[in-house]
Amino acid sequence: MRILVINGPNLNMLGKREPEVYGHTTLADIEQNLATRFPDVDFSFFQSNQEGDLIDALQRADVDGIVLNGAGFTHTSVALRDGIASIDTPVVEVHISNIHAREAFRHHSLTAGVCVGSISGLGVEGYALAVQYFLSRSAQ
């Protein structure tokens, strides 16, 4: 199974940025954890602070599933939503924090409606849960 993990703006600052919200785990830690926990999965990882780069990564992906943390673009980007809708690859949206327990502008996800599922508020474990979803789906 091939899975692409895409992380959006400011997630390159995990471990430093607002640790009271996002914890002390870095993006590299998340990637290493996934590769260690799921050795049979062929992972690729991508992070960008640029909206168009995220859309390009979605559209050129040749994988079985995509785990996407669109970060702030989740709440603002019609273009990212349309990028997800334009591909056949299933996407699971992941958020480290509980977006519904935060500022009101974070309560709505523009992208969730075109994803197969959304995981929010379970910390970095949400990434692993998304991978487990894809693995269980392929076993069916």
Image (cartoon, rainbow, N blue to C red):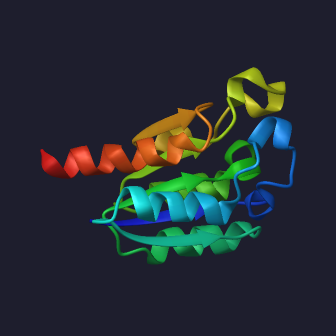
Q: How many marks?
A: 0
Q: Percent position (x, y) of residue 15? A: 78, 54
Q: In this view, does 108 lie above or below 80?
A: above
Q: Which of 42 and 62 is in front in this view?
A: 42
Q: Percent position (x, y) of residue 9? A: 76, 60
In the picture as drawn, the residue positioned furthest to the front comes out as: 36
Q: Nearer the viewer, residue 47 or 37?
A: 37
| Residue drawn 64% across the image and 66% down it | 28
Which quadrant of the figure contains the C terminus?
A: top left
Q: Percent position (x, y) of residue 120? A: 59, 33
Q: Is residue 37 left or right of residue 127?
A: left
Can residue 84 be seen here? The reply is yes
Q: In this view, does 51 lie to the left or right of 18?
A: left
Can residue 111 be seen here? The reply is no
Q: Percent position (x, y) of residue 4? A: 45, 66
Which quadrant of the figure contains the N terminus?
A: bottom left
Q: Is residue 13 above or below residue 93?
A: below
In the picture as drawn, the residue positioned furthest to the top comes out as: 101
| Residue drawn 71% across the image and 66% down it | 51
Q: Which of 136 and 56 is in front in this view?
A: 136
| Residue drawn 82% across the image and 25% down it | 104
Q: Is residue 75 above or below residue 104?
A: below
Q: In this view, does 86 lie to the left or right of 19?
A: left
| Residue drawn 46% across the image and 58% down it | 34
Q: Is residue 80 above or below residue 116?
A: below
